[in-house]
């Protein structure tokens, strides 16, 4: 998978977790908490969804590496 494909998949899962978000308005640098206003439960649900979709474990220590679509694409591309 390319980073662009991973970024699109990340945004798909993000919108499933937080359906009030408009995928067309999510920038690559938008931070989950600071910009998109997700709470800790939303983030946990996103981590679970990403783990299932990509078949990788995401440790709590790695949460900062998936805090934006761009960071997540780079992080997941190395693990998928």
Image (spheres, grey):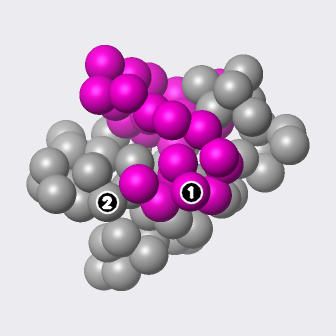
Picture coordinates of residue 13, whole percent (x, y): 51, 65
Whether residue 18 is visible: yes
Q: How many marks?
A: 2
Q: Are marks 2 and 1 in contact (CB under 8 Å)?
A: no
What mark, if any, has residue 52 been given in the picture?
1
Q: Earlier in the sequence, mark 2 or mark 1?
A: 2
The segment highlighted magenta reads: 48-74
Q: Quadrant of the N terminus?
A: top right
Q: Quadrant of the C terminus?
A: top right
Picture coordinates of residue 50, whole percent (x, y): 52, 52
- Residue 25 is left or right of residue 64, and the answer is right
Q: CA distance from mark 2 to mark 1?
A: 11 Å
**Residue at screen point 52% across, 28% down:** 71
Picture coordinates of residue 69, whole percent (x, y): 52, 42
User: Relative to 22, is 30 above or below?
Assistant: above
Closer to us: 24 or 17: 17
Name the magenta segment's main secondary structure: helix
Residue ranking furthest to the bottom: 19
**Residue at screen point 60% across, 38% down:** 56
The part of the image, by quadrant, that contains residue 28 is top right
- Residue 2 is left or right of residue 47, and the answer is right
Q: Nearer the viewer, mark 2 or mark 1?
A: 1
User: Relative to 16, is 57 above or below?
Assistant: above
Q: Residues within 10 Å of mark 1 (few under 14, many from 20)?
A: few
Residue ranking furthest to the right: 1
Q: Is residue 58 magenta?
A: yes
Q: Is label 2 in a helix, a strand or a loop?
A: helix
Mark 2 sits on what residue? Answer: 45
């Amino acid at each position: 998978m390319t980073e662009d494909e991973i970024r699109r998949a990340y945004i798909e899962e993000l919108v499933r977790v937080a359906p009030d978000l408009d995928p067309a308005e999510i920038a690559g640098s938008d931070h989950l908490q600071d910009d998109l206003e997700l709470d800790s439960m939303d983030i946990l649900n996103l981590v679970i969804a990403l783990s299932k979709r990509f078949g990788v474990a995401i440790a709590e220590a790695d949460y900062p590496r998936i805090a934006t679509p761009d960071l997540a694409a780079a992080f997941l591309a190395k693990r998928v």
